[in-house]
Amino acid sequence: MERRNQTVLLIIFSILLLSACSTNEQKEERLQEEQNEKTLAEIQELAAHGQILGERWFAGVTEFQEVSESLGEPDQKNRAGNGTYAVYEDHDTVIGLTENNRVFDLRSSAPDIKKITRAHTEKIVGIPEEVRHIDEQDILVYELNEEFQLKFVFLSSDDTATIDHLSVVHKPSEHIQKNVLGMSLEEKLGQLILMGVQGTDLDPAAKAFITEQHVGGIILFKRNFIDTVQSLDLINEMKQANKSGKAPLLIGVDEEGGRVTRLPEELVKTPSNRMIGKTADGDFAFQVGEMLGEKLGSFGINMDFAPVLDVDSNSKNPVIGDRSYGSDAQLVGEMGVQQLHGMKSKHVVPVIKHFPGHGDTSVDSHIDLPVIPHSEERLQKVELRPFKEAIESGADAVIVGHLIVEAYDRENPASFSKSVITELLREELFFDGVVITDDLVMGAIEKYYSIGDAAVKSIQAGGDILLLGHGYTPVNEVLTSLKTAVASGKLTEERINQSVERILTLKQTYELNDELPQKVDVDGLNEQTEELLLKMK
């Protein structure tokens, strides 16, 4: 009897022990599930802003230099189909980089996420917008918003499979990166060209540059405009010629207002910068920029080589004068920034000019090469001040003038000076937008340099777009020189890719397209301009 009782007690104890173990296991499972839920919720929240767990980097914003300064050199760098990937094994992190070394893809394989099953992922995050099957991987794709995409990668299709790694992708950057790497060299080089058209319609030679040489931009002059109907036809012809292009055309003009206007005479002129400067009214400057954007957008023109940010500090200057807001650098900066924002509000790209400042010259760069003898201290206080303010306020494109700026480079014009473009503009002033040369078909260049050599040097120095406003021979010469420079190694395709990425980013940022406007409301535009002019009285 006693032995039977001992046996019963042992059985009861075993049952209780098993029950306790089972309860502990269930508790642990519940705790793990709760932790997984918290982890997934945090992953989703961070990913919607471009981040991953445990890292402070932002996809689409962070520069790789910031990463490498913190984490050091990666264990390896791998070139893949849509970019370069830096692997940090100790951090369980892989970072995807664009051609300009900007982070566009953040990947994590941290231990915490590798405990989470596919079933649990779909339960908490929801049903994915897409499931991709690549090799033996299943990738759950979640479209979080217009900017960011979240991906969970599993090594099998089983519901019990756990996450191998996750990825947060900046969609605009990835799209641009794929476009860049999907272009031929000829298509990439075409994006670096902004050329002039000779007449009032699209002649066969100009059309061939767009369709066969893949030229990415056109600049229009007074010679191209007769009236609104003809102008609209010309612009639409150019857009139709580009229908098979990889990116929409940049179509730009020097529509500064006042005496520098290209649009047909039917339109009432917008006030000059000097007139705007005399009002010292930022709201008025914004409205003028808005009006300029409205006018240009009506024609399908998407880029304006304005506002002029040169400070009018030399009464003998033959080329600036009333194109400047005035002689006070602070006023020039304030008015220019407001006008810039007005243009941007209409999705027209403002191009600030003429960096690093053409105001204090007595030589017209259309004829000869001006020299700026001022000290760096003076340049920082006067000439550079408006450009600094515009860059800090979101300028996306800048024209660099043909100027010898002795404080930075005594040998090369700013338009192809590495000291000016890379060291001053990009590194010191933190400008990461599109750099455009002033027209290379000008006396300042033609008198002293081969146009092909000048073009190659400009790209080597960090420039992006080569402006060639007059004649077709210079366009052929520049394209030939660029191809030769790539073939010889003077220019790498990676360097070309950097510029193409910046150009495509600009086109995407402003939502440019090759849609064909049908009519220009001349009466409406004139009425708006006249109302604006009344505010000056």
Image (cartoon, helix red, strand yellow):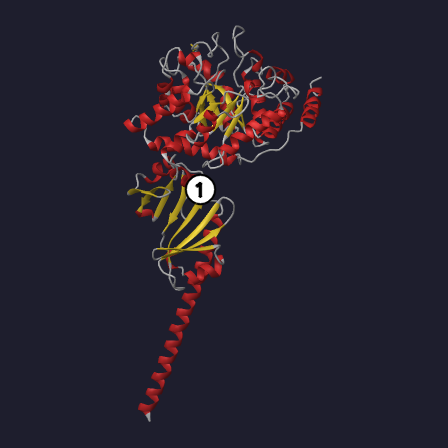
- Residue visible at 47% across and 28% down? 207
- Residue visible at 52% across and 8% down? 318
Total count of labels: 1
- Residue visible at 50% across and 24% down? 203
User: Which quarter of the rendered picture does the N terminus lie within?
Assistant: bottom left
Image x and y of residue 182, in percent: 39, 40
Label 1 element class: helix
Q: Quadrant of residue 268?
A: top right
Q: Quadrant of residue 520?
A: top right
- Give neighbour class at mark 1: few <14, some 14-19, many 20+ (Cα, 10 Å): some
Is residue 248 in view? yes
Q: Depth check: give the residue in front, 537 or 14.
A: 537
Image x and y of residue 108, in percent: 38, 49
User: Which quarter of the rendered picture does the C terminus lie within?
Assistant: top right
Residue linked to disc 1: 175
Name the amino acid type tagged 1: His
Q: Depth check: give the residue in front, 316 or 478.
A: 478
| Residue 279 in the figure: left or right of residue 462 | right
Image x and y of residue 67, in percent: 37, 39
Is residue 112 in view? no
Image x and y of residue 460, in percent: 35, 24
Q: Depth check: give the residue in front, 45 or 227.
A: 227
As displayed, is residue 178 above or below residue 432?
below
Q: Residue furthest front?
A: 204
Q: Residue furthest top?
A: 316
